[in-house]
Image (tube, grey):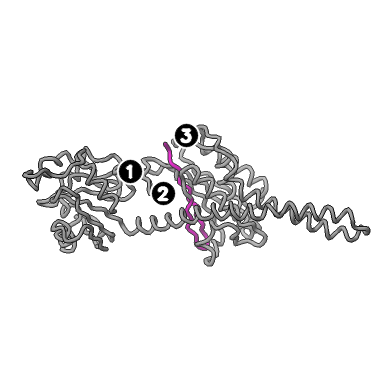
Amino acid sequence: MRRLIREVSRKVAGTDRKPDAGEPADRDADILPLGGAALHPGLDVVANPVLLVRQPGLRVIYANPAAEASFAVSRKAMVELSLPDLFGASEELDSMFETVMARQVDVRRQDLVLRPPLQEPMHAHVVIGGVEGYPNTAVVEVLLNEQKVRSDREERILDLTSANKELIRNLAHEIKNPLGGIRGAAQLLEFELPERALREYTQVIIKESDRLQTLVDRLLEPHRHPHIVSDLNIHEVLERVRSVVLAEFPNGLEIVRDYDASLPELRGDMEQLIQAVLNIVHNAAQALHERIARGDAQIILRTRVARQVTIAKRLFKLALDLHVIDNGPGIPEDIRERIFYPLVSGRDGGSGLGLTLAQTFVQQHEGLIECESKPGCTDFRILLPLH
């Protein structure tokens, strides 16, 4: 928020200067009636709702697209309203403004219940900051509770993925270096052994070394291959995945198509996206083994267009909203928060790499994978920007 305030202070009305001596303190009234049109364009892509408000009357003079999407009021209509018109009368909100406008503090933040006219009350975290050089103007950032929960969860996923990448690279190289020596020594030892029966032990060493080498290669795979980017149809990706999974599970599993045929093409690496979706769908099919045996297992592949979507704190006008939904037992609660960690698996014999690789591939496309799970319904949601 402080960085946002500094940016507004510097860019508001396209000027970097402070008021000159003798200039009226309320020059905001002369400079800002443009409704924020000259603001730095970066505010338009801020993920959270941001308003610029001016005294007297706490009149809204600028609203970003995220505010429009969150409050269901057009930006044009918002700049004709006051903050009480938009959020309802609030003594706490008035008190926050008074403190900031009096320059007693730079920033005030508080959890409030906003009561917009003709709407349900909104639980929100509100941050208000003064704008340097404009004593009658304040920046208001509003984070609705569900947005805050999603934002916090997304930030955890991104932090986790970043940490995973570094850990995986370091760990993989530390394993790979001695692995070749172990395998080579086992081969040399095998040549020296006089009895064939003893060679079974060296073969175990060699085979386990090869297995570890394969594991390391899979860990490093997302970091080795550059994007081969082209325009692609996501439904071609899904059809490839669907055919592969049904070939492995021909009986007892139904994979339902629920496609939005109007989806535009997206820019991406076809093979990486196939692998990402395949890892998720294949995991779902394996989790459905009991239902497959009964003949009532189902996976739904659903595509939609999402508008005004926030991914990694960036606001995108359009995004692919892809869901992989299964009717399995759900992800065990004890690993639900860790499913994107490497080597974490809810299945005996699972490598625990499928979802880690899927998340990495999707993030390389500026996207994100989220998951909601309960018994009878697990929903993996893949968001990919449509540029």
Relative to 80, residue 174 above or below: below
| Image position of 201 (left or right of 341) | right
Where does residue 152 sit, x and y in percent of width and height?
Answer: 39, 58
Q: For label 1, count other residues whose C-alpha is less than 10 Å away and answer few (under 14), some (14-19) or many (20+).
A: some
Among the 4 quarters of the image, the one containing residue 174 = bottom right
Relative to the observer, which residue lies in front, 147 or 157?
Answer: 157
Outermost residue to the right: 194
Rounded to the nearest whole Å, what is the CA distance between mark 3 and mark 2? 22 Å
What residue is rendered at 22% in x and 55% in y?
129
Judged from the image, the secondary structure of the residue bearing numbered disc 2 is loop
Q: Position of residue 344 (x, y in %)?
A: 59, 60
Give amino acid for label 1: Val
Which dot marks residue 312? 2
Callout 1: SS: helix
Tell me where residue 266 appears, x and y as whole percent. 47, 36
Give the magenta part as a residue range: 369-387
Residue linked to disc 1: 45
Q: Residue at x 90, y 60 (%)?
A: 197
Residue 379 is inside the magenta segment? yes
Q: Is residue 16 left or right of residue 191?
A: left
Mark 3 lies on residue: 265
Amino acid under label 2? Ala
Neighbour tally class for label 2: few under 14, some 14-19, many 20 plus, Cα within 10 Å: some
**Left or right: 315 with respect to 258?**
left
Instruction: Pick the residue in front: 14 or 244.
Output: 14
Task: State the SS at label 3.
Answer: loop
- Whole-number angstrom distance, CA of label 2 to CA of label 1: 12 Å
Kind of residue indicated by mark 3:
Glu
Picture quarter containing residue 29?
top left
The location of residue 172, given as percent across then percent down, is 63, 53
- Magenta stretch prevailing secondary structure: strand
**Mark 3 surroundings: few (<14), some (14-19) or many (≥20) residues within 10 A:** some
